[in-house]
Amino acid sequence: MKRSIGASLAIMMFLQYFTWSAWYVTMGTYMKSNLGSSDVQIGAAFSALAIATMISPFFVGMVADRFFAAQRIMGVLHLVGAALLVLATQVSGNTAFYWVILVYSLMYMPTIALSNNVAFTQMTDPGKQFPWIRVFGTVGWIVAGLLVGNLGIEKSANTFFLAALCSAALGLYSFSLPDTPARGKGVAVSGARALGSDAFVLFRDKPYLVFFIAAVLVCIPLAFYYGFANPFLNEIGMTNSAGKMILGQVSEGLFILAIPFLINRIGVKYMLMIGIIAWIVRYVLFAYGYGDPNSWMLYTGIILHGVCYDFFFVTGYMYSEKKAGEKIKNSAQGLFTFATYGLGMFIGTWFSGFVASYYQQGEGHDWRSIWLVPAAIAFAVLVYFLLFFREKKVPDAVAVEEV
């Protein structure tokens, strides 16, 4: 891959995740401050992205991959998305805001797969080259969080304007990216296959089925963090909370480097267990450390994001690919994403909203009780995982019958 192409792909990834980070992390805080939203309404707004995650495989697999060059449709989606982000700042009702965010999410989520497609198509050795390109997405997420925090705009509409500006820039920039023609022209693709139904064969393998169920369930605690960590930190008086939450992405970038080494040393089971235990520890720290906005417990809970996410979800993607083998690995990844960031997060966002609402006390919350709920759920998932997951150190690919 030429250095100039690598640079253009790195810029693409930076803008892709800068856009997401700029509005998403602080959306709950914005809704509380500007729309007077209830916790249930905040949970519903975060569920929009989960709904879009479940729908986007159909769009990418049945439309984008068959009829359009990836970089062009990505450009159009980001330009439309920029307009929708601006529109989100103009509505004053929670119902209207929800629908704007839902439509925006339907524009944004397919661009993740499309940007990956653009990157992989240009690479001569994706296994080595993609991590170095994708890391610029993490950098973009971090820079956006630092800007939002240091500019003091967490509660204002400026977060959406910042995201809209970046989305428009990426929309225009996309048309200059290397050509990535439609991959599936003339190929009939069913809705089930676009979803990843080819990977259903993996459920015949008991260890993978146990893992898959655990992955869906652990997304419920994940949703608590995404939806309510920033409102929580702001409510208890932490200054520049968005900027400090970036410590979680920094740890994510560092811990991901250790995964290839550790997964071969300690095996999949213990990697996944460490990830689940980290969720429990994080929420216990939040539950008992919130009396002091500068408590080491809060900072440790934020930094644990790298272990929480990388050791379970990144390892989970690697485990799915190993189990699937070459023939159905793309379907397996699509199915895993649908089940976790789609179904699991949809359940989690709504449930977290109801829990936060139940423990609301006047203008504040009983945060100890709120955070102990996802801690208990993660503990239950850990017990389930310990009882039923039995896997070799290096899993074998599931045999796929020829159709």
Image: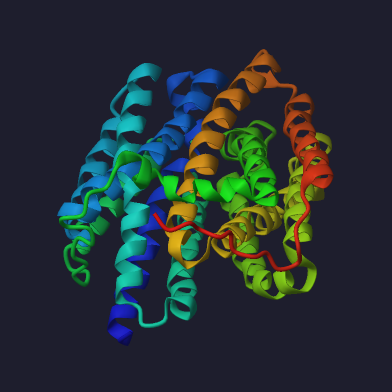
Viewer-nearest residue: 239 or 112: 112
Q: Quadrant of residue 71?
A: bottom left
Q: Quadrant of residue 237?
A: top right
In percent of the image, x 29 and y 49: which residue is there? 60
In percent of the image, x 48 and y 56: which residue is there? 401
In percent of the image, x 70 and y 50: which residue is there? 207
Viewer-nearest residue: 279 or 385: 385
Q: Is residue 85 visible?
A: yes
12 vs 351, left or right, is left
What scheme was used to colour the molecule? rainbow
7 vs 80, left or right, is right
Give the x, y percent position of residue 234.
62, 36
Judge whether 302 appears above or below 119 on screen.
Answer: above
Judge whether 54 appears above or below 60 on screen.
Answer: above
Viewer-nearest residue: 115 or 202: 202
275 vs 128, left or right, is right
Give the x, y percent position of residue 158.
37, 41
In percent of the image, x 33 and y 48: which residue is there? 110
Judge whether 151 appears above or below 237 on screen.
Answer: below
Q: Residue furthest bottom?
A: 2
Q: Residue furthest front?
A: 402
227 vs 189, left or right, is right
Give the x, y percent position of residue 384.
79, 39
Q: Quadrant of the C terminus?
A: bottom left
